[in-house]
Image (cartoon, rainbow, N blue to C red):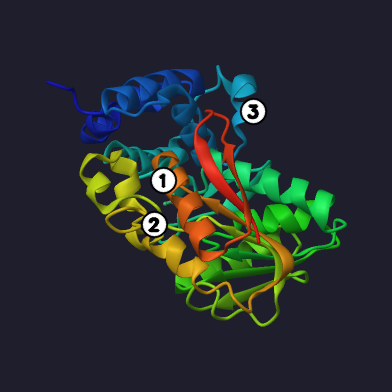
Amino acid sequence: MPRAPYIFSALSTVSHSPYQERTVGETVLRLCDDLSQAGVEEARLEAELLVAHVMGKERAHLLAAWGEPMSPAALPLLADLVERRVRREPLSYLVGWREFYGLRFAVRSGVLIPRPETETVVDAALRLAAQRYGDAPVVVDVGCGCGAIAAALATHLPRARVYAMDNARIPVEVSAENFRRHRVEERVTLLEGDLLAPLTEPVDIVVANLPYVRSGDFAAIQPEVLWEPREALDGGPDGLAVILRMLGQLTGKVRTGATVLMECDPRQAELLVREAKRRFPGCTTKVLQDLARLDRVVEVLL
Ligand code: GLN
C-alpha cells in the first residue's frame, strides 16, 4: 500500500514534526519520493520546482540553499500544493506559470498549458515570416489560450502585427496579462469570438493550436490533462472538427499567398492534408515534425 505523503503525517504531528527540522535538500528528496509514488513522471524536477516556489525563489537557487533549514512559514503552502499535485493537478497550475519558447507565461485553471511540441509552430511561423513576408507579416493566433504562440511571435518579430483570439473569457484575460508581461500588448490585438470570426483584416499567416484530441482518447489520457479545459482539447470523434471548421472560415480572412499552420495529432496529419487540398485546390502542403519526430504541424500555402 502506498504510504501517505509525509506532508500529511507531518501535519498530524505538528507538536513534534520531524518535517519542520528538515533542510531544503532533505525536503526536495522526500518530496521527490512522494511525487514519484503518486505516479508523477518528472518527480525530481517537480519537487525542486515546488520547493523553490514556496521559498519564493528560482530553482537555480536551491543548490546554494541545499543545507539550510526549510522555513516553517513555507510549510503550510507546501502541504497544500503537494496534496493537489498528488491528486494530479498539473504543476503549472500550482506554481502559476509555464515556460514556452524561452518565455515564462502565466497560466491557471481554465487555460491550456503550453506544450513543447507547440514550439514547432512558432519555429515554422518565424521561418515563413523571413522567407515569404519580409519579417513583417500580419499574423493571427486562433485559439490563443494563454497567448504563448502570439507572444513568442510578437517578441521575435518586432515588425509584425499580431492578432490573438479565443472564444473563452479566461484565456482572453490570461493572454492580456501575458502580453503585458512580455511588453507586446501594443502590437498584439486581442479579440474574443468564434475562431476567425472576429478578425477585422486579412492576414499573411494563420497559426492554430486548436483542440485535436479525439473524444474517445480521453478515457486513457494522462490524469493531468483532465484538469485542463476540455473545450481546448476535444476535437470531436476524429479530432478534426474544430480545425476543419476554422478552414471553412478562411475565405476573406487571408491575403493572397497566405500560409496556415495547424498543430495536429500525428495520426491526423495525412487526413488534414487531404482535407486542405480538397478545400483549396492548388494549395501547397507540408507536414512538419516536432522534436520527438512526430508529424505535428500541417503547413498549407494557399
Ligand atoms: N498536445 C495536446 C495533448 O495531447 C493536445 C493539444 C490540443 O488539443 N491542441 O495533450
Distance in Å between CA atoms under marks 1 and 2: 8 Å
Secondary structure of residue under mark 3: helix
Residue 214 location (% of width, % of height): 31, 50
Secondary structure of residue under mark 2: loop
Question: Residue pushed farthest front?
Answer: 282
User: Circles 2 and 3: CB distance less than 8 Å?
Assistant: no
Distance in Å between CA atoms under marks 1 and 3: 40 Å
Q: Which of 244 and 145 lies nearest the eye of the viewer?
A: 244
Residue 248 location (% of width, % of height): 49, 71
Earlier-in-chain disc, 2 versus 3: 3
Q: Residues within 10 Å of mark 2 (few under 14, many from 20)?
A: many
| Kind of residue indicated by mark 3 | Ala
Where is 274 relative to 222, above or below?
A: below
User: Circles 1 and 2: CB distance less than 8 Å?
Assistant: yes
Q: Quadrant of residue 222?
A: top left
Residue wearing tag 1: 268
Q: Residues within 10 Å of mark 1 (few under 14, many from 20)?
A: many
Secondary structure of residue under mark 1: helix
Tell me what residue is drawn at x 20 percent, y 44 percent.
219
Earlier-in-chain disc, 1 versus 3: 3
Q: Nearer the viewer, mark 2 or mark 3?
A: 2
Residue wearing tag 3: 60
Q: Nearer the viewer, mark 1 or mark 3?
A: 1
Q: Which of 83 and 210 lies nearest the eye of the viewer?
A: 210
Residue wearing tag 2: 240
Where is 180 relative to 300, above or below?
A: below
**60 sits to left or right of 93:** right
Distance in Å between CA atoms under marks 2 and 3: 41 Å
